[in-house]
């Protein structure tokens, strides 16, 4: 796969994280009387650094939806079946074909999904989020209740079992409804018609043994072996356990204010984080929050808000924001008074970036161009390269990622990033500052990339981050002076953590 292809596969791009899919996804919850929700707490989503819609679906919402859905589709069948079929088709696309989840849930996404009512769409989002977030534990629960392993090609049957188990274990859907729908769905498809009995018995056992399954869920690996092996090698077993635990919980909603963080925190009844981000619980429809229409803030994980700040005082300066969409960092640069050139090669993502800046009443020069063919009219005082990456730092926001990425993606992306950094270096004025960032947990896309750049670019001196300059980042400054966050690291005492991010900084000598 070429670097370009790899970047295309990544279109749901990494740092979109919250920026592109804000907090409107329903909240999967495990039900039930006296039942611990375990790690099945809610989730988020939405679109763009603010343009989201949709309503949070609480426990009762999910329940109601399961009983009354099926509207908005011509497909006959019992209530809930159309939503269930759409969820099955999308899960197959993700886990069998490796398609990123985000685009399948957007306006032009999976056909079965597009035809659903808003309520059923919410239910499908909730089911898929929980099915992917807890995929390891669900897989384990199913495997242990099968008499013999499923045929490797029994993708549809596997998906039906996963979605049924997801509803039983993590959503507020009555067990009998979840089981009946799964059995009906199996019976209606000739590829799975003969497995109705198996679906019924496995799901009934899962319902009966729910408490013990949930009690042991945290000890089941929540990512493919190759990813866990890398993290254990790079970060050690303890931090890897913290990373995995963070992935099991839906992240909070972080906002970056255009100005006056304290005033906005008060207005939104949010928590003010040490970097000026405002943190809210997930249960919000982003577009209905105060200050959305007036463009007072945008959705951006607190860690994602750090790289742009490393540039320092950029007011009135020419700043290039390379790989800019959906624009969380462009907005930060513009709000800080810079003259920003936002370079983005994807036309659709550039449209989103423009829409986001319009809502925020911020301006930038837009260059819809590939970094490798872009030709700036003059050099820049500052450059921020927020490169395409494996996005493994954002898994808590994109729980499909572990199941769609492959290890060779990292090799391909590493080469792309290295070339992008070298290209960016050509456009900086002497004395100018370059910041490179990725939302990856992989050293090849972060620390190693920075070392390679320093070694191969004599004209650039590293500008290590000092805690005197950024006291609030004390826990995130590495001995080499890089910014490094990992999911599971508290920020300013807030245990809800941040995404995994990396950033390094250099000054051009002459
Ligand atoms: C990590 S995302 C950027 C997130 C963005 N900086 C933000 O804060 O909202 C990477 C972006 O790079 C874009 N991209 C990938 N390859 C590119 C290239 N060769 N030239 C320009 N943009 C590229 C992708 O389309 C994607 O929008």
Image (spheres, rainbow, N blue to C red):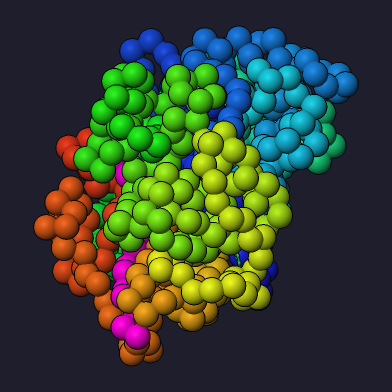
Q: Quick one: 136 or 102, which is closer to the camera?
A: 102
Residue 251 in view of the camera: no
Residue at horizontal 50%, vertical 56%?
A: 340
Q: Quick one: 59 or 174, which is closer to the camera?
A: 59
In this picture, which residue range is highlighted in magenta?
A: 497-510
Image position of 347 (left or right of 406)? right
Q: Is residue 74 magenta?
A: no
| Ligand 1 image-quadrant field | bottom right
Image position of 32 (left or right of 46)? left
Residue 353: % across, % down: 60, 47
Total number of numbered discs in the rendering: 0
Q: Quadrant of the N terminus?
A: bottom right
Residue 331 in view of the camera: yes
Q: Residue most toward the front? A: 316
Residue 239: % across, % down: 24, 55
Classify residue 441 by image quadrant: bottom left
Q: Quick one: 388 or 335, which is closer to the camera?
A: 335
């Amino acid at each position: 796969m070429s670097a370009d292809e790899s970047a295309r596969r990544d279109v749901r791009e990494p740092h979109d994280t919250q920026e592109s899919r804000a907090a409107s996804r329903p909240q999967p919850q495990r039900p039930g009387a006296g039942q611990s929700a375990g790690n099945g707490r809610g989730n988020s989503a939405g679109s763009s650094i603010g343009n989201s819609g949709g309503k949070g679906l609480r426990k009762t919402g999910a329940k109601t939806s399961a009983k009354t859905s099926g509207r908005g589709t011509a497909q006959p069948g019992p209530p809930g079946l159309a939503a269930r079929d759409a969820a099955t088709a999308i899960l197959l696309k993700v886990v069998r074909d490796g398609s990123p989840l985000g685009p399948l849930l957007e306006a032009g996404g999976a056909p079965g999904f597009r035809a659903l009512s808003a309520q059923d769409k919410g239910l499908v989002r909730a089911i898929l989020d929980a099915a992917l977030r807890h995929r390891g534990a669900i897989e384990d629960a199913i495997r242990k209740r099968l008499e013999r392993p499923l045929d490797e090609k029994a993708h549809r049957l596997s998906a039906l079992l996963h979605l049924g188990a997801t509803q039983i274990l993590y959503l507020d859907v009555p067990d009998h409804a979840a089981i009946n729908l799964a059995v009906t769905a199996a019976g209606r498809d000739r590829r799975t018609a003969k497995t109705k009995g198996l679906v019924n018995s496995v799901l009934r056992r899962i319902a009966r043994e729910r408490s013990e399954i949930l009690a042991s869920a945290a000890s089941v690996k929540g990512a493919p072996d190759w990813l866990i092996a890398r993290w254990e090698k790079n970060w050690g077993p303890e931090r890897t356990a913290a990373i995995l635990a963070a992935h099991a919980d839906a992240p909070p909603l972080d906002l970056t204010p255009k100005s006056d963080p304290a005033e906005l925190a008060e207005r939104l009844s949010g928590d003010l984080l040490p970097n000026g981000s405002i943190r809210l619980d997930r249960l919000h429809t982003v577009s209905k929050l105060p200050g959305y229409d007036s463009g007072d803030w945008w959705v951006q994980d607190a860690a994602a808000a750090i790289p742009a700040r490393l540039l320092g005082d950029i007011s009135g300066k020419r700043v290039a924001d390379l790989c800019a969409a959906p624009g969380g960092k462009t907005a930060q640069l513009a709000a800080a008074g810079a003259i920003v050139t936002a370079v983005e090669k994807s036309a659709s993502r550039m449209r989103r970036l423009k829409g986001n800046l319009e809502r925020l009443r911020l301006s930038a020069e837009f260059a819809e161009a590939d970094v490798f063919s872009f030709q700036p009219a003059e050099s820049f005082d500052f450059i921020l390269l927020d490169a395409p990456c494996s996005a493994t730092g954002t898994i808590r926001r994109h729980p499909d990622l572990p199941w769609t990425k492959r290890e060779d993606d990292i090799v391909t992306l590493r080469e792309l990033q290295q070339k992008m950094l070298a290209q960016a270096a050509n456009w900086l004025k002497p004395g100018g500052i370059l910041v490179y960032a990725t939302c990856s947990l992989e050293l090849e896309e972060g620390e190693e990339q920075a070392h390679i750049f320093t070694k191969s670019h004599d004209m650039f001196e590293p500008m290590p981050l000092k805690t005197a300059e950024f006291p609030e980042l004390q826990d995130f400054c590495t001995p080499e002076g890089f910014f490094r966050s990992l999911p599971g690291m508290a920020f300013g005492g807030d245990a809800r953590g941040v995404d995994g991010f990396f950033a390094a900084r250099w000054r051009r000598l002459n």
